[in-house]
Image (tube, rainbow, N blue to C red):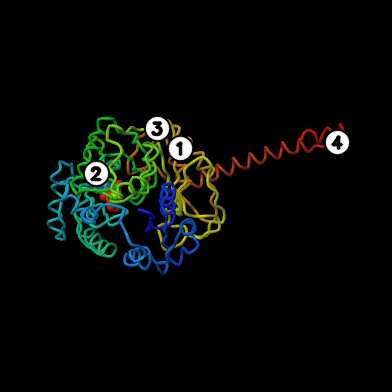
Amino acid sequence: MKKILVANRGEIALRVMRTARRMGLGTVAVYSDADRTSPHVRFADEAVHLGPAPSAQSYLDMDKVIAAAGITFIGPRPHAIEVMGNKLAAKETVSAYDIPMVPGLDEAVDDPDRARAVAREIGFPILIKAAAGGGGKGMRVVDSAEELEEQMHRAISEARNAFGDGSVFIEKYIASPHHIEIQVLADTHGNCVHLFERDCSIQRRHQKVVEEAPSAVLDPALRREMGAAAVRVAQSCDYVGAGTVEFLLDADRNFYFLEMNTRLQVEHPVTEFITGIDLVEQQIRVAEGEVLSFRQEDLTINGHALELRVYAEDPANGFLPSIGRLTTYRTPPDARVDDGFEEGMDIPIHYDPMIAKLVTHGATRGEAIAKMLTAIAEYHIEGIETTLPFGRFVFTHEAFRSGDFDTHFVAHHFRPEAIAEAGAEETRAAALFAAFLYQQNSQRLTVPRSSSIEWLSRH
Ligand code: ADP
Ligand code: MG
């Protein structure tokens, strides 16, 4: 392999190219009209124009992407992507591998009577889910038999619109879960290891905002058990490369398989920090046919890592997208920042509104939190609203700090006013500090009775 075409944009394209360059490989960027001058295009050795701004006519137009290269695909084989791309096919695939499943209906349903019967059997609340769903979309919680039919129709039409596939199924709605996912890595020679867990329970709209590794709630025995289950999931579809097996862990410490994501995920850096392994490098090595250079027993957890997804969203206003220009954009000095933006750039409306991944690592969870709070304070973004103040809310919150939280953290603890209050607090602190400086300066600037030389020398 001599050069790599990175079929993505923004921060992740840059992140992948950095590793490729470090490994001595050439890099090829692809770009749409909206990204002509973006950092990922400037960083690459070569760049290929794909088309207009909308993703469907550029980044997701596979014929255009493939025409740009003569390729060895870096990633799992088509079979694994296909079966794991559908939640029902995934359940079917892993069913012979002793994987605990969420109670529910493991086939598509469009008959309300059937759905009600299943729901009564497993007990309300239930979750109606799109088989082809992703990104937290196509899910509806149903609390009672009365509302089931309407919610089911909504879920079906939502799924049809969003994914072009209206199949939905039913799961028991787990009351107070942690989202625990396991990173796996498999080569083409039948070796597969797991790289421990990530806890991604802090979510809004069933979508992750804060992730950490390791989880504050797992012990070594449960970690081993979930890790082994994740490896079996990978084996069930002959997985190759880096992937993630997602589970829910309930309040009684039972875990259930949710789905497998057949790609490098946004939250992969926390795993890189605690294992010291560059996952993109491993993806490339696996694609080159190398044998994994470590076994399960060689892997250990080093310290604790946290990630905050910095989105162009307004946490004080329902996390709605906040689009505009980055009039000020300065990153913190002592944290890993994976981003693809610079001061003066516009956040395009065509793509996911994530600006950056802010990642810290410490010897302990407390140290990682302290570093994260410093990094948030030193990350200066103006022109748009971001999830940075939400991050400060999470990392200072007692429930997060003590590990006593679940996927409902936002619903249970977050009030939009907290952002304004923290803002006011910060403004008050800034005002006090300014007053303090002013006082100091005026002391210094008081023209002394002694000679002006002496006055100057005090500066
Ligand atoms: P997606 O494809 O959108 O990632 P997932 O099945 O991975 O869908 O679920 C995303 C999130 O939705 C989970 O992290 C969790 O917060 C919530 N969720 C999914 N299934 C359930 C369930 N059965 N009970 C409770 N929460 C769930
Ligand atoms: Mg998921």
Could you say which disc has been placed on residue 174 in the image? 2
Residue 235, picture quadrant: top left
Q: Amino acid at mark 1?
A: Thr
| Residue at image mark 1 | 396
Looking at this view, name the residue that lies furthest to the front.
2
| Of the pair 77 and 328, the residue shown nearer to us | 77
Instruction: Note whether residue 293 is visible.
Output: yes
Q: Nearer the viewer, residue 101 or 118?
A: 101
Distance CA(mark 1)–CA(mark 4): 48 Å
Upstream in sequence: badge 2 or badge 4: 2
Q: How many neighbours does mark 4 have within 10 angstroms: few (below 14), some (14-19), or many (20 or more)?
A: few
Of the residues under marks 2 and 1, which one precedes in the sequence? 2
Kindly tell me whether mark 2's CB lies below 8 Å from ligand 1. yes
Where is residue 247 drawn, in percent x and y?
A: 25, 43
Q: Is residue 318 visible?
A: no
Kindly identify the amino acid type of the residue bearing the numbered disc 3: Gly
